[in-house]
Image: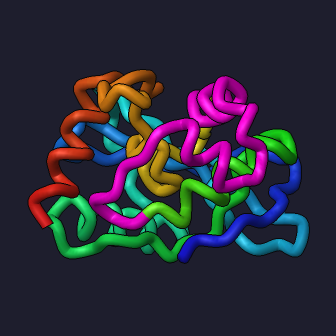
């Protein structure tokens, strides 16, 4: 399972690759203990190829490729998402969701022992800087409808359908 670290300041190193959802751009920094960590993963419709240039880029690109091919269900990468303590708590809870599982925002709020924080969980979910690896796409509305995904509802639908193929 992926783990969280604290990233230090400085310029990110990035790679950008095509994928079934368009393009992804992965950003990494050095952590406070000088370990390379992922700080951002974003999807877009267009991109310019930027080859992986670090060991973590290579590992992440390989794991993402395996995921898209249906060969990987869980990521094992060093992460350092920038956010508040509450957001980190929500994102840690998201990491416990299994491949193919989906749940409501209320479920996550209850999971973190803060059942009245449903809207705050939704906001934390929307600010997840490492989409897919921190699987915010697995959270849906209480009524079962797809709601909110920074990468777009179409990508969220694709990811959920992809994970149902098992």
Q: Give the range drawn in magenta.
A: 98-126
11 left or right of 6 in image: left
Relative to 122, say whether 98 is above or below. Answer: below
Indicate yes or no whether the magenta region holds residue 147: no
**Rendered location of residue 27, percent (x, y):** 58, 48
* Residue at the (30%, 25%) spot, across then down: 145
85 left or right of 67 in image: right
Indicate yes or no whether the magenta region holds residue 108: yes
- Residue nearest the viewer, comparing 4 with 101: 101
* Residue at the (87%, 55%) spot, across then down: 8
**Rendered location of residue 112, percent (x, y):** 72, 53
Relative to 75, say whether 83 is above or below. Answer: above
Extreme residue toward the left, this view: 165
60 left or right of 40 in image: left
* Picture quarter with the N terminus: bottom right
* Picture quarter with the C terminus: bottom left
Q: Can residue 25 be seen in this view?
A: no
**Rendered location of residue 4, percent (x, y):** 72, 65
- Residue nearest the viewer, comparing 34 with 87: 87
* Residue at the (21%, 57%) spot, across then down: 163
Relative to 76, say whether 4 is above or below. Answer: above
Residue 86 location, quadrant: top right
40 left or right of 158 in image: right
Count all numbered tags in the image, as a single digit.
0
**Rendered location of residue 50, percent (x, y):** 39, 47
* Residue at the (89%, 66%) spot, across then down: 32
Q: Can residue 158 be seen in this view?
A: yes
Residue 46 location, quadrant: top left
**Which colour style is shown?**
rainbow
């Amino acid at each position: 399972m992926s783990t969280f670290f604290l990233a230090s300041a400085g310029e990110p190193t990035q790679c950008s690759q095509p994928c079934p959802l368009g393009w992804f751009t992965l950003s990494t920094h050095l952590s406070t203990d000088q370990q390379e960590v992922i700080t951002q993963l974003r999807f877009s419709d267009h991109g310019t190829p930027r080859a992986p240039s670090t060991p973590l880029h290579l590992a992440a690109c390989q794991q993402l490729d395996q995921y898209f091919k249906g060969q990987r269900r869980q990521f094992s990468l060093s992460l350092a998402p920038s956010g508040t303590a509450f957001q980190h708590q929500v994102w840690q809870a998201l990491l416990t969701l299994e491949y193919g599982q989906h749940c409501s925002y209320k479920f996550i709020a209850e999971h973190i022992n803060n059942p009245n924080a449903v809207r705050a969980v939704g906001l934390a979910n929307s600010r997840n800087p490492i989409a897919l690896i921190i699987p915010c796409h697995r959270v849906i509305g209480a009524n079962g409808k797809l709601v909110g995904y920074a990468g777009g509802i179409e990508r969220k639908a694709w990811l959920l359908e992809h994970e149902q193929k098992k």
